[in-house]
Image: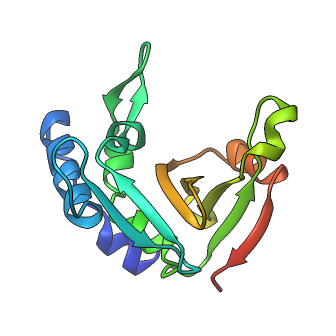
Amino acid sequence: MDKILASLLLDLTDLSDKDAEQLVFENYSDLYLDSGTIPRRIGVRKTHDDEECIFTESRFVHAFFFKERYAKDKFSKARGARVKWIGQIIAGAVQGTECWRIPPKGDFRRLAERQSNRLYLLRDESYVVWLEPGKGSRWWFSSAYVAGYGDIRRYCESGTQIWLKK
């Protein structure tokens, strides 16, 4: 693992899930949320190509929880430990980061109506960050996690690489 990325990991090992969740939420709020009132706080950060990425408090659960039973109901320490990676990766500060345009899934008649999603990929760590299209040149942070090799291959086979940080 890259030394910079290793230094950004949160050590959640000895924390309960509840304490780890609280620590990750505090970091997420400090790093990515600037204004507004609870539960509608938002923050704007820049992507590698100087476009705006909007972070919202409401995406915390989607990004850092996983489906154990019926919904995203279980906090993931593995996702949470990497909370500080997200901003660095989308800003283009991490060597080896790729950015992909991934077309939307679903009803092919509606594909022309929707923009593609943006996938930031750090292949050495199998780490992905998803952004969803907003209006104009804005993006919405969606999720970030360690993905399986098969998942990464599936994501990229329908997409187009638009940038690589060498």
x and y, in percent, of residue 114 in the image: 73, 46
Quadrant of residue 9 within the rendered picture: bottom left
Answer with the quarter of the image where residue 107 lies: top right
Position of residue 70 measured from the top left corner of the image (x, y, whole percent): 44, 13
The answer to whether residue 1 is seen in the rendering is no
Identity of the residue drawn at 72% across and 52% down = 116
In which image quadrant can residue 27 be found? bottom left
Of all residues, the one furthest to the top in this rendering is: 70
Q: Residue 112 location in percent, x, y?
A: 83, 46
In the depicted structure, whether residue 135 falls above or below residue 78: below
Look at the picture and state if 106 lies above or below 44. above
Please name the residue shown 42% across and 74% down the image.
88
In the image: residue 128, left or right of residue 35: right
Residue 21 versus residue 71 in the image, above or below = below
* Quadrant that contains the C terminus: bottom right
Q: Is residue 120 left or right of residue 78?
A: right
Q: Is residue 76 visible?
A: yes
Q: Residue at x 19, y 63 (%)?
A: 30
Tell whether 83 sits left or right of 35: right
Q: Tell which of 60 and 147 is nearer to you.
A: 60
Residue depicted at 20% across the width and 54% down the height = 36
